[in-house]
């Protein structure tokens, strides 16, 4: 049964400035704004990256879970790792056996999902979901709206390749996510790695800042890393210098975006 990294979510104090930076630098386009997230005191925007999505959410009121997260991590940053699967019910049974509570059960139309309690998973808010008819990556995916396939595709950003979770104890976090997701992790020179379907990975690394455990970086395949870095620099985004024109790292929304113009992702990427 497949398990795919389908969506990554950032949380921001203000929604539009982060969305504007992502769209300008990565040539992304908003494909959907979901009114249902108002139930959580949020508003959002989703941007298409091939058959995957980058989402940004921001609080609309005080006292939201997202607002508390912003306070705890000291500002904008990575918030959720969202996986889709072929059937949700086996995951509901499995997470109970490994001591993971369900923070929210989501059911709307042909979509159902489980948001797992971050105190039980560590790392980030983890969601596993399914949309009826969505086994085909080009089929329906409810969180991105009914017409995401007609949304403009980026001319610059091709795919999401990996999401990185930082921790002061990355080996323990990797082991916990391996237990939850029933996928092995492999120890590399400087990180632990879990392979998912749709050619994506989860990476677990030593925390490189004082913000604590969380979704710290996202790896993208782009068609021109050097050109994207140039646009980011003109936009005023923080950029890590790199001598490799096929790679680069920039910061938007409290997340490091590791860019690679080649298909294989580098074993390590520059950090700030």
Image (cartoon, rainbow, N blue to C red):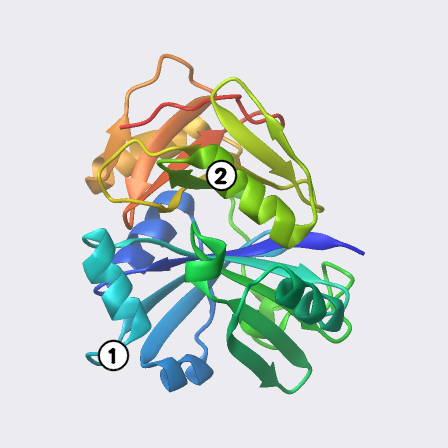
Residue 21 drawn at (x, y percent): 29, 51
Q: The residue tagged with tag 2: helix, strand or loop?
A: helix
Q: Tell me where residue 140 sits by quadrant.
A: bottom right
Q: x, y (%) of residue 238?
A: 23, 35
Quarter holding the C terminus is top left
- Residue denoted by label 2: 172
Residue 174 falls in which quadrant of the image?
A: top right
Question: In the rendered view, does 153 fall on the left or right side of 181?
Answer: left
Residue at x 31%, y 68% (from the top left corner): 66
Q: Earlier in the sequence, mark 2 or mark 1?
A: 1
- In this rendered view, identify the residue nearer to me: 157 or 193: 193
Which of the two discs, 2 and 1, sits closer to the camera? 2
Residue under label 1? 60
Residue 208 visible in rendering: yes
Image-based side of 268 in relation to 141, left or right: left
The image shows residue 157, relative to residue 147, as above or below, that is: above
Residue 201 rendering spot, x and y as whole percentages: 60, 39
Where residue 252 sits in the image (x, y, percent)?
A: 30, 45
The reply to whether residue 161 is visible in this rendering is: no
Secondary structure of the residue carrying tag 1 is loop
Up the image or down, 241 lies above or below 160; here it is: above
In this rendering, the answer to whether 21 lies above or below 38 is above
Residue at figure coordinates x 55%, y 47% from the top left:
176
Check the image and name the residue furthest to the top. Answer: 243
Q: Residues within 10 Å of mark 2 (few under 14, many from 20)?
A: few
* The N terminus - image quarter: bottom right
Q: Which of the two residues, 29 or 85, is positioned nearer the viewer here?
A: 85
Q: Which one is nearer the viewer's eye here, 226 or 97? A: 97
Identify the residue at horizontal 56%, vertical 75% (top origin).
145
Badge 1: few (under 14), some or many (20 or more) residues near its Cα, within 10 Å?
some
């Amino acid at each position: 049964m497949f398990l795919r990294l389908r969506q990554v979510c950032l949380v921001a104090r203000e929604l539009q400035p982060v969305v504007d930076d992502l769209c300008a630098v990565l040539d992304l386009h908003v494909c959907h704004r979901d009114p249902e997230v108002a139930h959580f005191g949020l508003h959002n925007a989703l941007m298409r990256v091939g058959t995957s999505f980058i989402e940004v959410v921001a609080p609309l009121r005080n006292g939201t879970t997202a607002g508390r997260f912003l306070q705890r991590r000291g500002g904008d940053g990575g918030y959720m790792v969202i996986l889709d699967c072929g059937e949700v019910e086996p995951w509901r049974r499995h997470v109970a056996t490994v001591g993971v509570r369900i923070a929210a059960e989501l059911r709307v139309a042909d979509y159902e999902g489980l948001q797992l309690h971050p105190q039980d998973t560590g790392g980030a808010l983890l969601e596993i979901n399914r949309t009826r008819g969505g086994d085909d990556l080009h089929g329906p995916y409810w969180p991105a709206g009914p017409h995401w396939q007609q949304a403009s595709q980026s001319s610059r950003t091709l795919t999401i390749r990996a999401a990185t979770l930082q921790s002061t104890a990355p080996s323990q976090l990797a082991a916990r996510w391996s237990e939850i997701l029933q996928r092995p992790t492999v120890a590399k020179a400087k990180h632990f790695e879990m392979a998912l379907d749709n050619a994506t990975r989860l990476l677990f690394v030593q925390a490189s800042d004082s913000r604590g455990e969380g979704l710290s970086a996202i790896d993208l395949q782009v068609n021109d890393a050097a050109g994207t870095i140039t646009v980011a620099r003109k936009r005023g985004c923080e950029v890590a210098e790199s001598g490799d024109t096929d790679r680069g790292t920039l910061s938007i929304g409290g997340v490091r975006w590791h860019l690679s113009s080649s298909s294989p992702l580098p074993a390590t990427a520059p950090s700030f």
